[in-house]
Structures are given as C-alpha cells and as structure tokens.
Amino acid sequence: MTTAEAEALLHEFPVVDGHNDLPWALRQQVAYDLAARDIAEDQSAHLHTDLARLRAGGVGAQFWSVYVRTDLPGDAAVTATLEQIDCVHRLIERYPDRLARATTAADMERARQEGRVASLMGAEGGHSINNSLAVLRTFAALGVRYMTLTHNDNTAWADSATDEPGVGGLSPFGRVVVREMNRAGMLVDLSHVAATTMRDALDATAAPVVFSHSSSRALCTHPRNVPDDVLERLADNGGVAMATFVPKFVLQAAVDWTAAAEAALVAEGFYHLDHTPRAMAVLAAFEAEHPRPEATVATVADHLDHMRDVAGVDHIGIGGDFDGTAHTPRGLDDVSGYPRLIAELSDRGWSRTDLAKLTWRNAVRVVAAAEDVSRDLRARTEPSNATLEGVDGAGGGSPSLPQGA
C-alpha cells in the first residue's frame, strides 16, 4: 500500500487516537494563550499537533489528555485538571469548523460524517480526583470519557507501574472508583498502572477497559507496557489496547538511554518529564554526547503485530502520545505520520478490515459499550457516597510520596 492509498483508507476510517497532550503543552509553553499557539497555523516549530497536520494524518477522533503532574497536592490537582478541561473546551469553541465536542459514539460518527475531529477528553491519573467520587462524576459531566487510574506515582488506592507497590494493585476503594467510573460512563484506562492493578481492574470492571497509550511488554520490557497475560484477557473484557509511539516504550535500547537522559535532567534541577525550552536544551546537550537510539515506523508496527496476535484484531488501537514526549520515532514525527504506519501494516499483510478496526471501529465500539453499561447501572443504582477513609480506613492505602513523575 502506498502512502496515498493509506490516506484514502483513513479518509473513510480515520484514526481514533487515544492520547495527545496538547493541552499540557499549551499550559507549559504559553499558559493557555491559544492565540500564541494558534493551531490553525503551522506549529511544527513548537508542537507535534496542529489542525493541518491532524487532517494530513487522517485523525478523525482525538482523546485530548487533561493530564496534571502528580506532585500537585490534593485540591490543586483538581483545579489544574479543571483548567485543562477548560483548555479543551476553548479549543473546540475556537475551531468549530475543524473540531467537534464528542462524548458518545454517536458524536464520534457524526463528526466523521462532517469531516471534523471528534474531540474527547481523558484524565491522566487518579490523583486528579483527590479521592473524591463527586469530583470524578463532575469530570464525567464536563465530558471526560476516560481516567487513567494512576500516572507515574501511586494513588492511595491504586499502584502505578513506575512506583513501589503500595496496596498490591487496587485497594477496596480503588474497586469502588472503577465501579463508579462504569456508572458514570468513563472508560477505565490502564496505561501507567502496575500489572497487579491491571488485573484487579479487569476483575472489578463491568465495562471494557482501554490502554490509552501502552505497547507490548514482550517486545520492550518497560513496566508501562502491557504483559501478554493481560492482553489475552481483553477478548473476554471487550477492551482495547492502544499502542503508543514513545521510543522509550517501544525500543529496548531507548529505555536505557532515556533513564540516563532523565537523570541528567534531574541533576540540573529539572522535573524528569520537563519539556520546557530550558529542559530541552539540557536534553539536547546530553544527546550531543550520547546519540539517541532511533525507533522507526517498523518498530511500532512490530508492537501492533504482536498485540494483534495476542489480544486479537478487535482489541487493538493507536495512542500516539504526541506533545507528551520529547522524542518520536522516525516517520512518526508528529500527528501527520499515521498514513506511514497504515502503509507499513498493509505491507505486512493487514487487511483493509483489520486496519479499519485498528483505526476507527474498535475504539468507537468500546465507547458505545461503556455507554451501555452506564445506562444500565444508572437505571439500577444510585451514585456512591463512599470515601477513601470509610472504605480503606484512616490513611487510605498509604501511598508513597510523589517522586515528581
């Protein structure tokens, strides 16, 4: 398949991308001054994302991440998440001819028919709700359609993939959070969580789960990736694992290089995921002395091949993590690169039907399934008034202190 043929396929079955950190990039770079980073104009000097490149990449729906850092304490994390949500709402209002607010599968289909990018939101990290089910429901009412149970640090009720074990997966209150997400129609996102948390969440949920931006642990042993036994469970659950492009999650050599680069940032007094210009200058100096291992389109395709083999073609998708990473694979440099990945997979024998499932159909089906579960639970149950202290006891799950990730 040529790139032009891939573009034609994406015109009919565009990409539903599970994770893009544009709102956080706008917060960091210009304090949400949308005129200063007008995505109707070429932003390739500053961002992975603008409207022209979304169209060139065949993106038909985007889960915009409303991520905030885990070292924001308590209510400050709630406030910052609300600011992120406001940013997405403002983007949709600013570009109504190109972006469409979406909260349902029907909204996604309508946007596709209109040639607009269906814009959904995902909260990245359970710290954003400050242990409050009322805050969780409020986020859902504002249009947030998934929540990643943790980011890089544990919450009081769930273990992260990149922190020391705290509660051994999900605590009892964590299971309540999952059930309340089911009731609210929010997808349970298992990217960033420990494998124990993945398994506990699959046991607890009544709705399909997603991995909004995670790849295969069998191919790259980063703890953020999904073990095969969890991928195998997606067929029964109905969920979707959306492969990410971040080199340190898809290329083993990049795992080691990234650890050294992040240590160099920390040594200079920066947060290890900082992408501000000063931090990027430190990384550039490090890279000049230590060349960065390069992932490619083929590297990502290897992960998708494996994930299809293990989970089945009905249970995979794409979650690029653009504008949330300093580095990208060659050929997937920004949101315009998806046709290259589709052409690569076609050349490996993926059928048109397989590709349509990967890009559009699987993700839309999961959103619709979450709606069905929510409708049923709302008809039969009341909102939960449970609290962390009431369910897990005083002190909750005794999470480790934030490590700045």
Image (cartoon, rainbow, N blue to C red):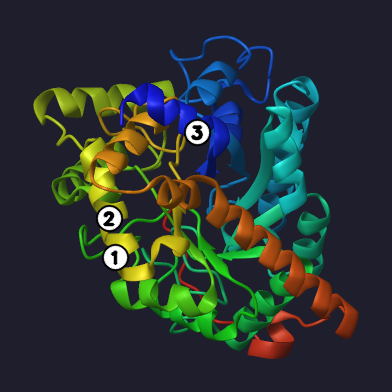
Query: In this orientation, which residue lies closer to the viewer: 287 or 117?
Result: 117
Name the residue at 27% across, 34% down. 329
Please provide percent x and percent y for residue 208.
59, 71
The residue that mark 3 highlights is 10
Rendered view: 190 above or below 80: below
Residue 400 in sight in this render: yes
Q: Residue at x 51, y 14 (%)?
A: 43
Q: Name the mark nearer the viewer: 3 or 2.
A: 3
Q: Which residue is mark 1?
A: 309
Instruction: Label 3, secondary structure: give it.
Output: helix
Amino acid of disc 1: Asp
Decide which of tag 3 and tag 2 comes sooner along the chain: 3
Q: In the rendered view, does 217 fall on the left or right side of 69?
A: left
- Helix, strand or loop for disc 1: helix
Q: Earlier in the sequence, mark 3 or mark 1?
A: 3
Name the spot of residue 3 as percent of width and height, x first.
35, 25
Spatial distance from mark 2 to mark 1, Cα to Cα?
6 Å
The one nearer the camera, 238 or 53, is: 238
Name which residue type carries label 2. Answer: Asp
**Position in image of residue 204 (x %, y %):** 59, 84
Q: Decide: marks 2, 1 in contact (CB < 8 A)? A: yes
Q: Is residue 135 left or right of residue 282?
A: right
Residue receiving disc 2: 305
The residue drawn where x is 33% and y is 43% is: 246
Mark 3 and mark 2: span between their CA atoms?
Answer: 19 Å
User: Toward the viewer: 175 or 308?
Assistant: 308
Q: Quadrant of residue 182?
A: bottom right
| Circle 2 SS class | helix
**From what the image shows, is residue 280 above or below residue 52?**
below
